[in-house]
Every structure is written in structure tokens, then in C-alpha cells.
Amino acid sequence: MTQTNQPLLEMRDIQKCFGNVIALSGVSFDIRAGECHCLLGDNGAGKSTFIKTMSGVHPPSAGEILVSGKVAKFTSPRDAMTAGIATVFQDLAMIPLMSVTRNFWMGREPSKGWGIFKHFDLAHANAITMDEMQKMGIRLREPDQAVGTLSGGERQTVAIARAVYFGAKVLILDEPTSALGVRQTANVLATIDRVRKQGIGVVFITHNVRHAMAVGDRFTILNRGQTLGTAVRGDVTAEALQDLMAGGQKLAELEGTLGGTV
Amino acid sequence: MTTDSTPQVDERLAPVSTLSRLLRRPELGALAGLVAVILFFALAADPVMFSMAGFINFMTPASQLGILALGAALLMVGGEFDLSIGSMVAFAGLIFGTAVTLLNLPLGIAVLLTLAVGLALGWINAQIVLRTALPSFIVTLAWLFILRGLSLVGLKWATDGSTQMRGIDEAVAGDMFLGIFSGEAFQPAFSWMANAGWITSFANGQPTVTGVPVEIVWFACLTLITTWVLLRTPAGNWIFAAGGDAKAAMNSGVPVRRIKISLFMLAASCAALVAIITVLSSGSTDARRGFQKEFEAIIAAVIGGCLLTGGYGSAVGAFLGSIIFGIVMIGLTYTSIDQDWYLVFLGGMLLVAVLFNNIIRKRVTGER
């Protein structure tokens, strides 16, 4: 692991209010190169609001965002992207009817030629897409295969590969495993590991403790708009995380009736 | 599409044959339809229909519709409709007629003015649709009536009570730009081919087909250009993206608004071009010009594989769809079949095409 002391992205005491609703009341979080920092929280804990603040969708009401130690202000997702912060949202920003290549390069098409003959260099785009997908462990039948024919896990991987190829330093993944089957989840977790080893900081948002424990280096728990602290891998058990997510309430009783399946 | 890299073979995937690759093209339905109507008329119609003169006969109306259909198809791929393009043909015809007859403007200026009015109408449509986020279907339906009404009122006003404006031939006679929008192209080549005995000619040596009507040339060129833009430029990718999922496209940095505005303006300028060409060819303009052409253009685009939901379709498909229209419309006159079957055919073809497109879409997206 290539950890340095300087975080790639640091969120200091972030607050966010929507009218009289306080969605976030002082959340601090940081992400370093080559680590996977899991952000855990139950539904309504403020995870979505927090990632939207991190990815520039809306500015915080109070608090500071630091990129590589310098204060940054994001007014749009574009600003965040320019700063190297890429977010893969649950809806993925993928268009099922379009080919993998066309999706991969959407909005950033490479061109070739001059003047009116300037065109989308598909051969080059196809070759790079095939190559990048292969690095992520997905073998495409052909680059003009429609994204709609891919499985959910494969689509996640295309979205991640796209973010990584276009120079993401911090990759925010919004519940990437929530709608996936066992095998596909394993594939996505393996992808996270691969991306982390390239020195990218991965923010992994989930409410599944087991998925978090599988790849996480650090764990931060969000509850009712506040952080309940950050734990390092090895210092914490899955049960403890689970309890913290539920707001300190013991899940033991419930777990007893459900036979330890939660 | 080919790549230099040779991907590793995944043993779970059956090899993709060229056939099944072809089956995924949006133009497939239109191609099958074209083969079907050609076979039908080859059997049912007078063989003259598929002579060169017959070809020109059905390609001329096909081209006049096809230019509209190309604009409509691109707009549909971009996720929007324009139901006002038929009325826009009448309105642009009025503007053009007024410019050359009443204002005595030279043809070049009149053409530019007509195109400018078309572009402005497209821009207005786009602004209303984008700013209100209303469906383009309803916004342009309103303009279908507004423009048809304005054409009627305007014609009466310009001609002192008539709904037809004449005298356009005389007004543009001898203009240096006339050959671009009217008459036939490649006439010397056809005379030469007739002299060489390559094509049929009359007893006096005049070829039976003296040239290619300009609308066919316009239609062919526009098909090539729009296909190139759609498949081989970043703008083409943005059109597919804007129609496929506008929000996802915007999040990926695609200028969705700019694309949609341009597409509305393109569809409208296609209508203006059709107005110029047809008004010059008939020498007059009237309020019924372009009547119901918006529906025919959309049907041609749908036969060509455009999905009503956007994000999928092709310009070549719209090209083939328009030719199907031309063949059936003209072909019926070469048979003993009542010509009014044309409307029955039109509806039937639309229904078959939509059902077929649904299957194709499922094939493409791998839905089951």
C-alpha cells in the first residue's frame, strides 16, 4: 500500500442544511492514495448528501473541502472531475442502447483528421476500450456490444474503468454492490482492489458491512448526519460496525431471532 | 467496426456471426421492407416501373419526403419529435414565394431568407421544449396548427384572397443559382451516355431520361452527410447520448441542450429546403403544401429503425424508408390496384415497423 500522510481529499466538519432539515452536522472524512475508505451508514444517515457534496453536486453549508491540502470550492460536478474526483453514481450514467465504446468515450470522444473531415476515431477508441476492460478483467465480445447486454457488475466495471482511464485520483462509488448477485459483487470488490493498487483512493459507500470488511482499509460510520468515528482495518469487528450503523443499538436481539443473517 | 487488438476468447461466448451482427443494425427492417415492396411491384406492376424513367419517377417524391425524414430521424435519435415540419414546408414556401414574387429578391437571397426563417422556427421550437421541459410532441403539435394557419392567412394577405401564389417561375427565370434547387443535374452526362448507346433514347437522339432531378442529388448527399455525422463524429455520439438518456449524457459532459437545439434547427431547415425545391418545381405555392408530411417523415424514420423513445436509429434507415414510400405511392399507378390503398399501406407499414423495432431493441440491449 502506498499511503502518504497527505490526504488526496479531505472533508472538514462538513455541514449541509436543506431549509430547516439538517442533513449533515459536522462530518469529517479523508481519503489517501491507494486506500479504500468505506463510508458506512444506514438509509437516511446522510450518505447520499455527503457524496453529493464531495462530488460537487451541491456546495456544503459550512465546512471545508481540501484537495491535496489546498482548500477547494466545487460549484459543479465538472469542478470536482477536473480536480480528479470521479463519482460512479448508482444510475451509472450509462446508456444501455449505446455500445460500450460509445459509452466509455461519451463526452470525451477522441478525434482524428482536420477541418470538416475531423471525426470520431472509432478504431482507436475501440482498441483502448477493449484494453481497459481487459485490465479490469472483463472480456468483451466486441467493443460495439451494447451496454444493455452487460450484467450489472460489468456495467459497474465499465463505469469504474472509464473514471480511472480519464485520470481519477479519487473514485467515489455509491453503493456499487447493492443490486448485485454474489458473483457480481465479488467481481466489483476485486475491481475495487485492482483500482486501489493503482494508487487511486477509493471511497466505497455501502450499508453492507461484509462487503466493506472484504476490501476496506478504514471504515467511517455515518449516523443521523454525524460521523461516529473512523476505525482502521483489524481494530474493529463486523459486529461492532453493524452495531454502530444501527446507532449504537444492539442488534444482538434482532440477530438472535433472525439466526445471525443480518 | 474492426480493431487492431485481438481480444482473448471467452469460452462462454458463442462466436458472433456476420449475420447476427447485421441483424442488430437499425436499418435491417427498412432493408427487408424495401426488398419486399420491390418484389411485390416487380410481380404486380408494369415492368416500365423499374426502367430508368420509372426509377426517377418514384425517387423524386421519395427524395422530397426523404429530405424531411432525414431531419426528423436525427431529431428522433436525439430524443425529440417535430410535428410542425409539414406545416413549416407551407410556411417556408410562403416566405420563399413572397420573397421572389412580391419583394423581387434574387433567388440566392430568397433561399437564404427562407432557410433563416426555418432555422428561427426550429430554434423557437427547441427553446420552448427545453425551457418548459414539456414533451416536444405537444409543443410542435401546437406549431403544426399555428404554422398551417399562418400560411393560409399569409397567402391570402399576399395574394389578395387566394390560397395559391403563382408566378414563381417567371420571377426566378435565368437566375444563376436556379440549377442548384431546380431542374435536373448531370444532363451532359446523360446526353453523352445516350449518344454512346448506354442508355435508351428517343428516335431524335434525346435520352429518355435527360438527367437526375436535383432533389435526388440533395437527398443522396444529405443521407451521406447525416450518416457520417451520426456514426463517425463526436457530435453523432452526443446525439445518441442525448436521446438515450439526457441526464446521463449531461453528467458525462455532453452538451445536450446545444445538441437538441441544433437538431430542431436541422429538421426545420430540411423543411425549408423541401419548400424551396418543391415550390420551384411546381412554379407556385399553396397552403396545402407539405400537408401531413410530418407524419410521413416520422413514419419513414420509424421504418428506418428509429425508436420513438430516442437514442437509436439511423439516417440510412430513413433513406430506405422514404424510398419505400416513393415506390408504393408511384408503384400503385403502374398496377390496376386502387391508389387509395396507399393510406392502408402507410398505416400497416408503421405498425409492422414499430413491432419489428421493438424486437430489434430487445436484441440489441439483450433484454429477455
Image (cartoon, coloured by chain):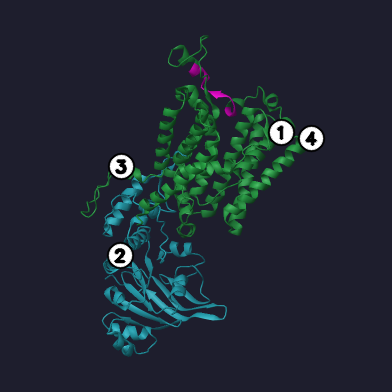
Q: Earlier in the sequence, mark 4 or mark 3?
A: 3
| Residue tagged 2 | A195
User: Residue A16 location, x and y as percent?
Assistant: 51, 77
Q: Which residues are magenta?
A: B180-190
State the image quarter where residue B173 is shown.
top right
Q: CA distance from mark 4 to mark 2?
A: 75 Å
Q: Is residue A170 above or below residue B264?
A: below
Callout 3 and callout 2 share a chain: no
In the figure, what tint was chain A given? cyan
- B250 left or right, relative to B129: left
Compare residues B70 and A36 and report the one nearer the observer: B70
Label 2 or label 1, whichever lies nearer to me, is 1
Q: Which circle marks residue B316 in the picture?
A: none
User: What is the crowding at mark 1: few (fewer than 14 residues within 10 Å), some, or many (at least 20)?
Assistant: some
User: What is the crowding at mark 2: few (fewer than 14 residues within 10 Å), some, or many (at least 20)?
Assistant: many
| Residue tagged 1 | B164
Q: Would you say the residues marked 4 and 2 are in contact, meaning their CB atoms lie under 8 Å apart? A: no
Q: CA distance from mark 4 to mark 3?
A: 61 Å
Q: Is residue B8 above or below residue A47?
A: above
Location of the N terminus of chain A by quadrant is bottom left
Q: Residue at x 72, y 36 (%)?
A: B163
Q: CA distance from mark 3 to mark 2?
A: 38 Å
Label 4 or label 2, whichever lies nearer to me, is 4
Q: Would you say the residues marked 3 and 2 are in contact, meaning their CB atoms lie under 8 Å apart? A: no
| Residue tagged 3 | B19
Q: SS of the residue at dot 2? A: helix
Q: CA distance from mark 3 to mark 1?
A: 52 Å
Residue B19 can be seen, yes or no:
yes
User: Residue A240 location, x and y as percent?
Assistant: 31, 86
Q: Amino acid at mark 3?
A: Leu
Q: CA distance from mark 1 to mark 4?
A: 10 Å
